[in-house]
């Protein structure tokens, strides 16, 4: 086979003379590491997940890659911008890059969980959006940790109507946090629950409660971005 005819731009394809694997995952500038130093600093992101005290009872641990809010003087947060482009703009390429970044950062958790699941969307919202962003983060993470990915352990029971979205963040989170655990699938003893953003912790706590109502298990949670309350303690893994 003549590869030059099948891939005239070379394989892997090159963009403006720079191979894709030599670009920053977030800003696409030429770079030799996964994320450039500038994007790491602006996103306040480390090379591995950090842990913090779970804001609600029911979680055995809460891990995150970066804070949702960064110092305004530093300008936009490239990690948050990439997530929003994926979640609301449907940019699947950004979704794949975020999955890889998240999976690489979660490697220190190897051996400490038995399975990975994700916060589910209501079927109606899943049809509207076309994908569940948490699944795109959870699947590569499970593969990186060498444990099963169990996307059907949880089911979302509610899909609030649009007018409910006008209420406060806390009211909205409470009315939206109704989940049940699968009655037919067994729940492993240490589950890592994945979501894209943790805002109030109510959603993660409701998922953990649903899982623990089915089995005596420990539920850890990992999110890409954490909305920190003042005085939140952070530790490197
Ligand atoms: Zn960058």
Image (cartoon, rainbow, N blue to C red):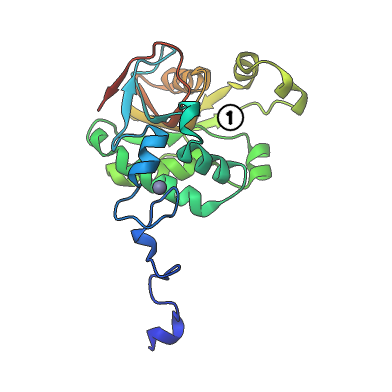
Locate the C terminus and report the quarter of the image it occupies.
Answer: top left
Q: Is residue 129 visible?
A: yes
Q: Nearer the viewer, residue 202 or 70?
A: 70
Kindly identify the residue that appears in the image at 35 percent across and 29 percent down: 191
Q: Is residue 189 visible?
A: no
Specify whether tag 1 is near ligand 1 (CB below 8 Å): no
Residue 209 position in % (x across, y down): 46, 17
Q: Quadrant of residue 188?
A: top left
Most distant residue in the bottom direction: 2
Residue at numbered disc 1: 156
With respect to residue 171, does 7 lie above or below?
Answer: below
**Residue drawn at x 38%, y 84% as measured from the top left:** 3
The location of residue 120, given as percent across then percent down, is: 54, 34
Tell me if 104 is positioned left or right of 199 in this view.
left
When asked about the image quadrant of residue 212, the answer is top left
Secondary structure under tag 1 reads: strand
Q: Position of residue 225 (x, y in %)?
A: 45, 30
- From what the image shows, is residue 34 above or below residue 133? below
User: Which residue is at 39% across, 62% downward?
Assistant: 20
Is residue 112 found left or right of 222 in the rendered image?
A: left
Count numbered badges in the picture.
Answer: 1
User: Crowding at label 1, few (<14), some or many (≥20) Cα neighbours within 10 Å?
Assistant: some
Can you name the residue that lies furthest to the right here?
Answer: 163
Location of residue 94 with respect to 56 vertically, above or below:
below
Q: Is residue 12 above or below residue 38?
A: below
Measured as percent of width and height from the top left, residue 45 is found at: 36, 34
Pick the quarter of the image with the N terminus: bottom left
Q: Decide which of 104, 212 is in the foreground and name it.
A: 104
Q: Is residue 119 left or right of residue 217?
A: right
């Amino acid at each position: 086979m003549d590869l030059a005819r099948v891939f005239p731009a070379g394989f892997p394809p090159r963009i403006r003379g720079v191979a894709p694997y030599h670009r920053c995952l977030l800003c696409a500038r030429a770079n030799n590491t996964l994320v450039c130093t500038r994007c790491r600093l602006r996103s306040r992101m480390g090379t591995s997940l950090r842990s913090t005290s779970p804001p609600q009872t029911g979680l055995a641990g809460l891990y995150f890659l970066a804070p949702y809010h960064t110092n305004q003087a530093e300008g936009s947060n490239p990690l948050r911008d990439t997530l929003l482009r994926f979640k609301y703009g449907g940019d699947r390429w950004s979704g794949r890059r975020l999955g890889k970044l998240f999976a690489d950062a979660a490697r220190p958790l190897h051996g400490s969980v038995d399975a990975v699941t994700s916060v589910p969307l209501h079927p109606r919202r899943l049809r509207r959006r076309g994908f569940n962003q948490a699944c795109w983060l959870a699947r590569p993470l499970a593969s990186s940790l060498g444990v099963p990915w169990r996307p059907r352990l949880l089911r979302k029971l509610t899909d609030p109507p649009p007018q409910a979205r006008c209420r406060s963040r806390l009211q909205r989170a409470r009315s939206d946090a109704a989940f049940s655990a699968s009655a037919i699938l067994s729940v492993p003893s240490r589950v890592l629950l994945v979501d894209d953003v943790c805002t109030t912790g109510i959603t993660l706590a409701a998922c953990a409660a649903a899982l623990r109502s089915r089995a005596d298990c420990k539920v850890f949670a990992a999110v890409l971005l954490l909305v920190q309350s003042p005085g939140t303690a952070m530790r490197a893994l």
